[in-house]
């Protein structure tokens, strides 16, 4: 394994009020505040972690879900290696809107960004509107990882981020020297990774969580 | 040793338990042989050995001083779909089968070690398989020094024989002797009653008795010494070579660098990419004439008379031989252009040069001379006014032509007007460059031509300076830059294209700010005025459908509200403001701020440097403030709650909907919005009711345009190269696609090659340029290898077409199959032998070459072929002998060429009954 630190940029996107900031806060600071002020534009947090002996510097970009910010936010999508698309399991609409967010991603990022779809707020079990299977199926279609979480009860949040990071490490080659992600350097037929699939890989493999 | 008689136990004792080195070797060899699993398989189909994959199992073993490799070669035979009878003895069957008599692959040719880029790899098939048609055998080969000593060979041969006997090895075993490149093998195969011995003779010239079939037959029968009932079956192949193609020689025209490029078609040359090869990539055509199976008693072949007249041969086949060394023009250009990316010189270093030139012709301020315009009608002094020679930087005329092509709207003829710049639908393989044939593409073509064929760096510097200047002029005059996609900078396009998009947006914003028509409407107006046919850009609706119809007439509503609301777009559904019966209006807001990717990066960088998250929220809230102010202006008595209902509906918790009040007025803000002192509230408090058009501009078009112009003017030569590499490769790909149109159907793996090239361009175009250790340059160079491979294949295909189908343009499936096989350099059979159309054409070419050589005319009636370059005779005998029952197969192959003679024999012997009665 590499000894240097790998720098990764991860986006958290989705409709407003689905719990993007809460997820991030739970992961980075293990805190939960039901009354976090709505994000304005974008914000970020960093976290260092170690996965399989590899040191990783995570830069997590939290975004506002409001329609009006849509023109502002894609500016910060650049160079992201992973994206977490969040919906609220108690709000069908937030799930249906994922398609638009995926489109947004396609337009503004590198084609082989590693994606994870997260159904948040499973603590609101009796208000659930989006079936787990539905989310899972959609993720599979989109070749994205899938997990259901609760930032409030701290369920699967850690796993979600870690699984995404693991997948990113699988999907990319990293520069030995400075550990900067070079997400796209796999040239077909020029390295060992000849079997790498075009259009961003085989993300159907992993499901994490319960 | 074991048999040695020992008379005196005391005097001489032999320890029989210790094996000698020799015994150890045999036992080890036997052990290896025993591990081989042998499965009976079906009979080989035609050419199967050349086409299938081969597996190799290698073991190392020591013998005296020799480090030997024991390698088992086995063909991976695909199981047959239909069951067929299996052979009694596979080796015998393979040896007697004529299906693999002639290798599909060009063995002689491929054996060379080419170091040329596009040359194919050596084939997998082992010479033993070629000579004998075997599918499974083992070869002992010395690792380093060749086995030259006769006694060593004998010793090894007998050990091998013992090992085979002991281990019951089921496959033939060979020892490679003499120099490795001679391909000489001695072999043994034990099949119970029958024992086959393989022997190869390799000489420089053939002994006279072996030159013709009659002599070979005598030798063959003499060697066997047993009479068979069946006659000897003979397979014959005569090979002819054609190297002089005369008028069918393929050449691609390339504009010579020394040509006068001030000629009429200058613009055509400079606006297109080169394509082609420096020499005919097909340098030899081989013709095989074959008699696959004739009985010895119906043919005669000796020095004086021969039945083997190629014209009457049962089968004709041809093969191409390629020259892999020609320079591929397109790849060559790309290669050269990449060197520009490493140039550290700034443009300004060339300004001096250019201006000093100018001083010679005219004494005036050099800088202003350089930067003055050459737009027709503009009162600039022309600096370059024909005072430049061709070897120097570009002259006035050339620049003029190039800008006619690049900025066709400035030209009266508008010969090169840009087409509809419609972007392709979403494509994950999209190369991050620009739309095909758009300005950025044309610019890269021009730069590449200037740099590689004409005036090098000075030319690039001059042209770029001129281009930047043109851009500045256009911005000054608010003239839209043509050939650039509409809308915001598209992150999926290259940075240069984004910058030009930005310039257009700046001009557009200025137009609107100054109350002029947006570009698209200007265009429409022009079209209504006159018949001038401009390149249509009708997709500009983004810009002009905004204000007019949607803004509710402010005058009309002004009197209704005491606070004079301004900047309303429309009502938001049926919503009414809280504690009021006023409708909630959506305000006119400031247009979003366009940014190019480098600016975005700076923004992100800046944000990352702010450690306080509150401060970051402040930074982020500029657009929120603007929107709030617009909202307040449009809804003077609106509250934060109303704003949230429009802006972030999920933060408005509606209370039980009252059917009598369907205006969404009953409810409260979400808890998170109500946190005291949160940014939303504080910004709301500071927001004043100011309509969007009176607010401080979030986007300063003047400043932004200046930034772009400065960006253009401050490039180094290297960065100009870097900016244009991706578009240049993109245009190259398009060029290749276009050039391949009528040949791609039969180029092997064309689709795969194209996909790979696309994929790699796509990948690299999205990578940031990395100058350390020439990283990016090296990666693009790898992509050139793909380009060159495709360019060469396309030219090979064209060359074959020119030779074999000089007048044909439509190809049926049979033609395509034939061409595809020739592209693979396969031995390609022509139906009906010499009567085949292609056969006739080949014959004609041979005769034309001969006639030209002898300075004669080609005569229709006396077509002949020259002397063959190779003759091959394969003699086979099997079946019952006259008086010894069933005999083993007997095999002899003689290959005669001008500088080599090879005999490959395989003779069987009955080991159980050796004396005749």
Image: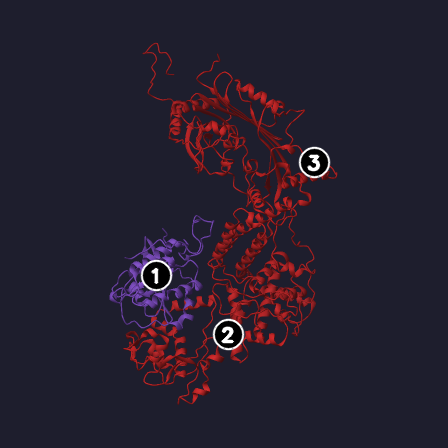
The N terminus of chain B lies in quadrant: top left
Residue underneath mark 3: B863
Q: Colour of chain A?
A: purple
Q: Colour of chain B?
A: red
Does residue B365 lie above or below B108 as drawn?
Answer: below
Which of label 1 and label 3 is nearer to you?
3
Q: Residue at x 68, y 65 (%)?
A: B397
Residue underneath mark 1: A117
Q: Residues within 10 Å of mark 3 (few under 14, many from 20)?
A: some
Q: Residue furthest top?
A: B7
Residue underneath mark 2: B543
Q: Residues within 10 Å of mark 2 (few under 14, many from 20)?
A: some
Which of label 3 and label 2 is nearer to you?
3
Q: Residue at x 33, y 80 (%)?
A: B662
Chain letter of the residue carrying label 1? A
Which callout, 3 or 2, points at the residue further toward the start of the chain? Answer: 2
Is disc 1 placed on a helix, strand or loop? strand
List x then y, in percent, for residue B491.
Answer: 47, 65
Q: Are marks 2 and 1 on the same chain?
A: no
List x then y, in percent, for residue B383.
Answer: 66, 68
Does residue B66 lie above or below A16 as drawn?
Answer: above
Chain letter of the residue carrying label 2? B
């Amino acid at each position: 394994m590499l000894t240097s630190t790998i720098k990764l940029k991860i986006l958290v996107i989705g409709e407003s009020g689905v719990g993007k900031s809460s997820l991030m806060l739970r992961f980075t600071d293990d805190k939960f505040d039901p009354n976090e002020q709505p994000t304005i534009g974008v914000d970020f947090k960093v976290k260092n972690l170690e996965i399989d002996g590899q040191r990783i510097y995570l830069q997590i970009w939290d975004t506002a879900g409001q329609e009006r910010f849509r023109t502002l936010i894609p500016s910060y999508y650049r160079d992201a290696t992973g994206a977490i698309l969040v919906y609220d399991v108690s709000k069908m609409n937030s799930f249906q809107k994922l398609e638009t967010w995926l489109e947004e991603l396609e337009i503004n990022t590198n084609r082989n960004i590693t994606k994870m779809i997260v159904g948040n707020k499973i603590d609101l079990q009796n208000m659930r509107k989006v079936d787990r299977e539905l989310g899972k199926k959609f993720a599979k279609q989109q070749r994205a990882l899938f997990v259901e979480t609760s930032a409030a009860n701290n369920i699967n949040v850690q796993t979600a981020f870690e699984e995404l990071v693991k997948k990113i490490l699988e999907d990319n080659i990293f520069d030995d020297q400075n550990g900067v992600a070079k997400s796209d350097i796999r040239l077909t037929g020029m390295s060992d990774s000849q079997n790498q699939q075009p259009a961003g890989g085989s993300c159907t493999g992993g499901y994490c969580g319960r | 040793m074991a048999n040695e008689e020992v008379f005196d136990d005391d005097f001489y004792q032999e320890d029989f338990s210790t094996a000698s080195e020799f015994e150890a070797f045999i036992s080890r060899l036997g052990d290896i042989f025993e591990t081989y699993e042998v499965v009976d398989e079906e009979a080989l189909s035609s050419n199967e050995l050349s086409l299938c994959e081969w597996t190799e199992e290698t073991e190392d073993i020591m013998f005296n001083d020799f480090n030997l490799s024991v390698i088992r070669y086995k063909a991976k035979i695909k199981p047959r779909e239909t069951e067929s009878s299996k052979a009694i003895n596979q080796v015998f069957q393979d040896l007697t089968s004529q299906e693999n008599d002639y290798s599909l692959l060009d063995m002689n040719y491929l054996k060379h070690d080419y170091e040329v880029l596009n040359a194919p790899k050596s084939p997998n098939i082992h010479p033993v398989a070629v000579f004998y048609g075997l599918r499974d055998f083992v070869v002992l080969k010395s690792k380093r020094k060749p086995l030259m000593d006769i006694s060593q060979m004998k010793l090894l041969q007998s050990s091998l024989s013992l090992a085979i006997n002991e281990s019951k090895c089921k496959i033939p075993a060979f020892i490679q002797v003499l120099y490795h490149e001679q391909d000489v093998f001695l072999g043994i195969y034990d099949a119970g009653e029958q024992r086959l011995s393989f022997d190869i003779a390799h000489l420089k010239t053939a002994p006279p008795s072996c030159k013709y079939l009659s002599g070979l037959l005598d030798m063959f029968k003499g060697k066997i010494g047993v009479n068979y009932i069946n006659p000897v079956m003979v397979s014959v192949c005569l090979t002819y070579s054609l190297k002089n193609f005369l008028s069918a020689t393929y050449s691609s025209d390339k504009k010579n660098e020394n040509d006068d490029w001030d000629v009429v078609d200058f613009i055509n040359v400079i606006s297109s990419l080169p394509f082609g090869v420096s020499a005919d990539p097909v340098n030899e055509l081989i013709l095989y004439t074959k008699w696959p199976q004739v009985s010895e008693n119906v043919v005669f072949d000796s020095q004086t008379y021969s039945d083997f007249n190629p014209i009457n041969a049962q089968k004709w086949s041809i093969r191409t031989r390629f020259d892999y060394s020609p320079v591929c023009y397109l790849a060559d250009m790309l290669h050269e252009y990449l060197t520009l990316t490493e140039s550290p010189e700034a443009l300004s270093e060339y300004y001096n040069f250019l201006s000093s030139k100018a001083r010679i012709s005219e004494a005036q301020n050099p800088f202003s001379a350089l930067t003055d315009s050459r737009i027709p009608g503009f009162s600039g002094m022309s600096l370059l006014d024909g005072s430049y020679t061709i070897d120097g930087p570009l002259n006035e005329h050339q620049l003029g032509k190039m800008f006619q092509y690049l900025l066709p709207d400035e030209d009266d003829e508008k010969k090169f007007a840009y087409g509809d710049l419609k972007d392709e639908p979403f494509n994950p393989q999209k190369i991050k460059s620009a739309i095909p044939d758009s300005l950025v593409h044309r610019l890269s073509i021009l730069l590449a031509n200037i740099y590689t064929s004409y005036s090098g760096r000075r030319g690039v510097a001059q042209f770029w300076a001129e281009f930047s200047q043109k851009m500045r002029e256009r911005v000054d005059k608010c003239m839209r830059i043509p050939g650039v996609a509409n809308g915001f900078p598209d992150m999926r396009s290259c940075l240069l294209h984004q910058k030009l998009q930005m310039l257009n947006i700046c001009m557009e914003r200025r137009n609107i700010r100054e109350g002029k028509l947006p570009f698209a409407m200007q265009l429409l107006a022009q079209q209504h005025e006159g018949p001038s046919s401009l390149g249509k850009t009708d997709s500009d609706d983004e810009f002009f459908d905004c204000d007019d119809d949607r803004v509710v007439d402010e005058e009309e509503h002004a009197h209704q509200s005491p606070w004079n609301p301004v900047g309303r777009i429309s009502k938001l559904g049926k919503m009414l403001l809280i504690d009021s019966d006023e409708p909630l209006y959506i305000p006119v807001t400031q247009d979003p701020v366009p940014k190019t990717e480098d600016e975005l990066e700076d923004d992100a960088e800046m944000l990352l440097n702010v450690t306080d998250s509150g401060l970051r929220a402040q930074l982020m809230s500029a657009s929120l403030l603007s929107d709030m102010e617009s909202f307040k202006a449009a809804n003077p008595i609106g509250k934060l709650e109303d704003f949230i209902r429009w802006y972030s509906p999920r933060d408005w918790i509606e209370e039980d909907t009252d059917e009598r009040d369907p205006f969404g007025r009953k409810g409260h803000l979400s808890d998170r919005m109500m946190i005291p002192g949160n940014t939303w509230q504080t910004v709301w408090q500071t927001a004043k009711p100011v309509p969007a058009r009176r607010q401080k501009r979030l986007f300063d078009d003047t400043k932004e345009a200046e930034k772009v112009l400065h960006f253009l003017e401050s490039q180094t030569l290297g960065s100009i190269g870097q900016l244009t590499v991706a578009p240049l490769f993109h245009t190259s790909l398009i060029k290749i696609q276009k050039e391949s149109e009528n040949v791609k159907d039969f180029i092997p793996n064309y689709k795969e090659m194209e996909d790979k090239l696309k994929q790699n361009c796509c990948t690299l175009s999205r990578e940031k340029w990395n100058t350390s250790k020439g990283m990016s340059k090296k990666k693009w160079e790898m992509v050139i290898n793909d380009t060159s491979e495709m360019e060469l294949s396309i030219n090979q295909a064209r060359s074959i077409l020119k030779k074999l189908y000089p007048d044909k343009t439509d190809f049926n499936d049979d033609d395509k199959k034939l061409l595809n096989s020739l592209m693979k350099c396969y031995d390609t059979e022509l139906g009906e032998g010499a009567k085949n159309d292609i056969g006739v054409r080949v014959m004609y070419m041979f005769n034309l070459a001969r006639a030209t050589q002898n300075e004669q005319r080609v005569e229709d009636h006396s077509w002949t072929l020259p002397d063959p370059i190779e003759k091959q005779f394969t003699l086979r005998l099997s079946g019952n002998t006259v008086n010894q029952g069933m005999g083993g197969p007997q095999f002899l192959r003689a290959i005669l060429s001008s500088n080599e003679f090879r005999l490959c024999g395989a003779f069987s012997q009955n080991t159980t009954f050796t004396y005749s009665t």
